[in-house]
Amino acid sequence: MEITVKSENFDGMRIDVFIKENTDLSRNFISKNIEDGYIKVNGNTILKPSYKVKVNDIIYIDESVKKKELDVEPENLPLDIVYEDDDILIVNKERGIVVHPANGHRDGTLVNAIMYHCGKRLSSINGIIRPGIVHRIDKDTSGILCICKNDYSHNDISLQFMNHTNVRKYRLIVKGNITKDFDTIETNIARDKKNRLRMAVSKEGKKAITKYKVLERFKDYTYIECELYTGRTHQIRVHMKSIGHPLLGDLLYGNVDKKFKNLDGQILHAYYLEITHPRTRERMKFESALPEYFENILKTLRS
């Protein structure tokens, strides 16, 4: 598996941190394999996790490292395919589907499904647990995802996400009536020290920028659209909580709602993705209609 350092944002970063940021491997696992000589930079074996990467460095991770990772089996599961060619696959993920295998979710994931559909035609940059996966959305979030079928397209799309030259928009319902019709939330986000399952606004975190606008107001709820300018874990959920308007149904960052007690997670839909095709350079726009569960909640609020 090869990873090329393409962005100046990574220049001077420790190699163990860089690999962790760009794969599904843990930092401890990476450090051990560096010290064991399984990882090379520009053809040279390095033995220190503290090595600082440089732009255009080519990092090679020995295939034997992959053998230690979780085995992932293809499964014949339904896929809602929005677009497909030899380089990319755009899918509409259902709510309740986990994107890639992890503890407690070894099968039934989106990765299991795309492995069956694509066979070996998936990028290898994120290892065998996340083949083809460039970006993720939470289990209970529905909507558009881009899958890459080769390392060339993966590197290109990843760079678009890193440089924010793509466009990602989400539709969501939050609790309470937001005062402003539109605004930009800019904070740093890091792992919550009190609850490791959550993220939190923190000076120690990474910059996170979310722009929102109100689409429709109800008495105790607001239907809004968010555009992401960064891609931090749980970014929208953390930012909405930070301004006092947690997502409806989000029990990790909010509470059970009296009007909607039986929701299966946050009401959040990744409805729009705009990218530049990695090979043709054509600007491509993809939209996903609101799923039925989302429309039913809006109908209830409107009535």
Image (cartoon, rainbow, N blue to C red):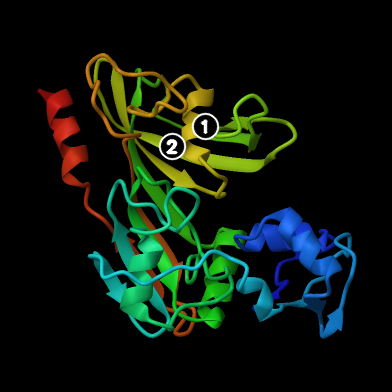
Image quadrant for the C terminus?
top left
Residue reaching furthest to the left: 303
Sequence-wise, the earlier of marks 2 and 1 is 2
> Label 2 sits on what residue type?
Tyr
In the rendering, at what x and y percent does residue 195 appear? 60, 27
Report the residue at 88% width, 73% height from top.
46
Say left or right for 167 vs 3: left
> Label 1 sits on what residue type?
His
The residue indicated by pointer 1 is 239
The answer to whether residue 9 of the structure is visible from this angle is no
In the rendering, at what x and y percent does residue 99 appear? 41, 56
Report the residue at 60% width, 60% height from top.
24
Say left or right for 141 vs 1: left
Q: Secondary structure at mark 1?
A: helix
Say left or right for 37 vs 178: right
Q: Is residue 215 above or below residue 84?
A: above
Report the residue at 72% width, 59% height from top.
29
